[in-house]
Amino acid sequence: MDKEQELASEEDVREARSKVTAALVHYLETYKSDKTSDSKHALMGPVGKLLPRITTTGDINWESVKGYVLSIHKNLQAPRGVSPDAAIRLDEAVAALKHLRSLLPPTKWLKTVEDIDDEVFFGLYKGHLIGQRKGIQKKFHDWLRQESSLDEVNALLPEEDQYASIEDIEDPFSTPTELEEIVGRFWKNYKKKKEGKK
């Protein structure tokens, strides 16, 4: 079997692929899922439908792809609809995909689309986790101000490890073991409040 002819340098492909991933993540910043889930389906939203649509070695009608994705975006966000900014960002992402496709032989295109799907999900999921962690850290700080104090925290720590302010305290996942009892009280309160909302 003949090896497929390379259409561009590895560096050009890597750069184009990076632009695609960034453009898709940028587009998805306009998509606000109503789901609180961190599943791939929930985070990827309309891009989860875009990538399988272009996984082909045949011709791609790029305008049709954009219309399809905007339709899904609109339906998933009803009644909010799609902002003009979302349409512009989608246009940029699809243009980046089209450019990348022009640089790759057909079989490499298929594998690259699969990889982009995973890269976009990783970027979104990582951002989701960081956001969750910051949210919990803020709740932890608020709880410390109400139910504890900086003095109580620092009394448990060696002098060289003491905090200058509550804002300097890590999230409850990362605190020193000396704060185990305080962190345990926070989680108990957190769980109680969460169950009270249900």
Image (tube, helix red, strand yellow):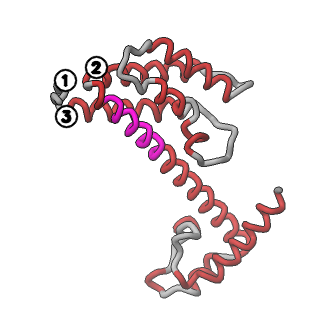
Q: Position of residue 98 (x, y in %)?
A: 36, 20
Distance from label 2 to label 3 (Cα)? 13 Å
Q: Position of residue 172 (x, y in %)?
A: 58, 70
Can you say which quadrant of the picture contains the C terminus? bottom right
Q: Position of residue 122 (x, y in %)?
A: 45, 46
Distance from label 1 to label 2 (Cα)? 8 Å
Q: In terms of secondary structure, what is the magenta stretch mainly?
A: helix
**Would you place residue 191 above or below residue 102 in this image?**
below
**Whether label 2 touches label 3, CB < 8 Å:** no
Residue type at mark 3 is Glu
Which residue is under mark 2?
A: 102
**Whether label 1 touches label 2, CB < 8 Å:** yes
Question: Position of 83 compared to 60: left or right?
Answer: right
Residue at x 59% of width, y 47% of height: 39
**Would you place residue 26 above or below residue 171 in this image?**
above
Which residue is under mark 1?
A: 7
Quarter-wise, where is residue 104 in the image? top left
**Would you place residue 193 above or below residue 31 in this image?**
below
Per the rendering, the mark at residue 88 is none
Question: In what element is the residue under mark 2?
Answer: helix
Which residue is under mark 3?
A: 10
Instruction: Name the residue furthest front.
Output: 1
Span of residues in magenta: 109-123
In the depicted view, which residue is nearer to us: 178 or 8?
8
Q: Position of residue 132 (x, y in %)?
A: 59, 54
Question: Position of 103 compared to 135: left or right?
Answer: left
Question: In what element is the residue under mark 1?
Answer: loop
Residue at x 58% of width, y 34% of height: 45
In the depicted view, which residue is nearer to us: 81 or 42?
42
